[in-house]
Image (spheres, rainbow, N blue to C red):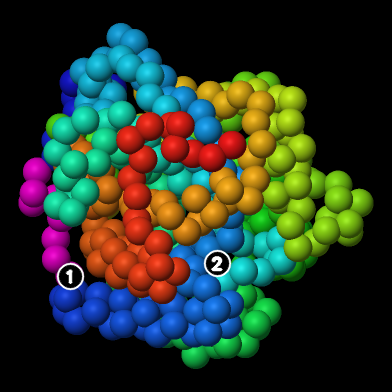
């Protein structure tokens, strides 16, 4: 990046409160809470209001690269270091549906050993930092007004089984070809297409976050050849036919029986708020103006990815929250501000109804084998 096009410096003025933001946000959170209660009655167990179904829970490490330039050596990435991580792969819907029903995929990363003040006061003593990523670069419902419309539609159909999932897909995408664009629907735009291998996906923060003195979006993409080969690769039909409900769990478990994997975390820094806004998450930041730049590497050894103990720990004990972070990585924009209240409300309800305390790990050894 040349001096004539500098990176935008972070300041509090970058965020702009939207008209009626508090009222709209409360409507969204209240609707989510009602759906949470419906899902609890359905399963007799409280689940997340998004990314309810996990497919793998991985133990790995994050290595911050050495000799990063000043604009990348920010926050967590200011000093070269290696951290243990827990990674949860999931699909985005707030109900438990067969894997053959396509949906956006999620990659939630919990980094352990991160000292310092945290943004959420109740987690001020935690030594963890979360990044939440999805395999699509933007939030199709990029403002709270659009998200409220989606949430109200979902609530109306929350007890309608597969119809609920189909509406969720179409509403979250805005148009069907959004899912097709990332391989989650076939070329006929059928939303029931299961999509490619989830280990070959690239995952994005979608919305902007503070990046120390700057503003950025985060991505994680396959790095080692064995996961790069899975990018866009369709899952064998025989595997889908054998278990249409949980084949994503199976293919991931099979891969990590004997394989290692490496991914690269990168940051895309904002250079122009007029074309790279923080208040509209549906706008994709142009990579030809500001490309993603590597900051760290995620590495995983062979392991059992979905033991009963590991699944319960990740699904019921842990919480993943984009606002559980260093102040240097605070999420930005109105769609993220509403998520702050939504995540905390959902997490409290889930842990209360399942009679489990929320725990932030202090050591990777707390993750069951």
The answer to whether residue 225 is visible is yes
Residue 15 drawn in magenta = yes
Crowding near pointer 2: few (<14 within 10 Å), some, many (20+)?
many
Residue 182 x, y percent position in the rendering: 62, 51
The answer to whether residue 142 is visible is no
Residue at the bottom extreme of this rendering: 156
Quadrant assignment for the N terminus:
top left
Instruction: Tell me the residue at 33%/45% (across/down).
Output: 360
Residue 65 position by quadrant: top left
Residue 305 position by quadrant: top right
Which of the two discs, 1 and 2, labels the residue nearer the N terminus? 1
Using residue 40 as the reference point, say whether residue 66 is left or right of it: left
Using residue 274 as the reference point, say whether residue 108 is left or right of it: right
Vertical arrangement, residue 15 with respect to residue 296, above or below: below
Q: Which residue is mark 2?
A: 93
Residue 36 drawn in magenta = no
Label 1, label 2: how far apart the Cα atoms are? 27 Å
Residue at the front extreme of this rendering: 355
Vertical arrangement, residue 142 with respect to residue 239, above or below: below
Instruction: Tell me the residue at 24%/79% (across/down).
Output: 26
Residue at the top extreme of this rendering: 67
Q: Which residue is mark 1?
A: 18
| Boundaries of the magenta span | 11-18
Residue 217 x, y percent position in the rendering: 34, 41
Secondary structure predominantly adopted by residues drawn in magenta: loop
Vertical arrangement, residue 183 with respect to residue 60, above or below: below
Q: Tally the numbered discs.
A: 2
Using residue 327 as the reference point, say whether residue 127 is left or right of it: right
Instruction: Tell me the residue at 59%/37% (across/down).
Output: 369
Using residue 334 as the reference point, say whether residue 316 is left or right of it: right
Crowding near pointer 1: few (<14 within 10 Å), some, many (20+)?
some
Residue 273 x, y percent position in the rendering: 22, 47
């Amino acid at each position: 990046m040349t001096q004539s096009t500098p990176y935008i410096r972070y300041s509090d003025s970058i965020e702009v409160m939207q008209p009626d933001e508090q009222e709209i946000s409360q409507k969204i959170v209240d609707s989510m809470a009602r759906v949470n209660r419906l899902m609890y009655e359905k399963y007799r167990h409280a689940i997340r209001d998004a990314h309810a179904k996990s497919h793998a829970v991985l133990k790995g490490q994050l290595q911050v690269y050495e000799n990063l330039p000043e604009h990348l050596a920010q926050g967590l990435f200011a000093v070269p270091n290696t951290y243990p991580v827990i990674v949860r792969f999931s699909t985005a819907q707030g109900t438990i549906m067969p894997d053959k029903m396509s949906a956006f995929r999620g990659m939630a990363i919990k980094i352990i050993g991160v000292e310092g003040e945290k943004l959420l006061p109740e987690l001020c003593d935690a030594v963890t930092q979360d990044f939440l990523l999805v395999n699509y670069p933007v939030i199709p419902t990029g403002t709270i007004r659009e998200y409220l419309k989606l949430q109200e539609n979902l609530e109306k159909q929350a007890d309608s089984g597969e119809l609920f999932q189909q509406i969720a897909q179409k509403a979250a995408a805005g148009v069907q070809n959004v899912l097709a664009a990332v391989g989650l629907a076939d070329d006929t735009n059928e939303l029931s297409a299961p999509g490619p291998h989830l280990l070959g996906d690239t995952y994005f923060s979608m919305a902007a976050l503070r990046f120390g003195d700057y503003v950025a979006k985060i991505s994680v993409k396959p790095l080692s050849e064995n996961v790069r080969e899975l990018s866009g690769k369709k899952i064998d039909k025989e595997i889908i036919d054998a278990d249409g409900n949980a084949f994503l769990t199976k293919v991931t478990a099979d891969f990590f029986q004997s394989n290692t994997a490496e991914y690269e975390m990168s940051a895309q820094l904002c250079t122009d708020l007029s074309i790279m806004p923080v208040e509209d998450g549906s706008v994709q930041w142009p990579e030809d103006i500001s490309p993603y730049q590597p900051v760290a590497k995620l590495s995983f050894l062979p392991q059992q990815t979905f033991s009963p103990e590991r699944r319960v720990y990740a699904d019921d004990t842990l919480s993943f929250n984009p606002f559980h972070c260093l102040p240097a990585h605070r999420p930005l924009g109105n769609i993220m501000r509403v998520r702050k209240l939504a995540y905390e409300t959902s997490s409290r309800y889930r842990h209360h109804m399942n009679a489990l305390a929320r725990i932030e790990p202090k050591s990777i050894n707390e993750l069951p084998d």
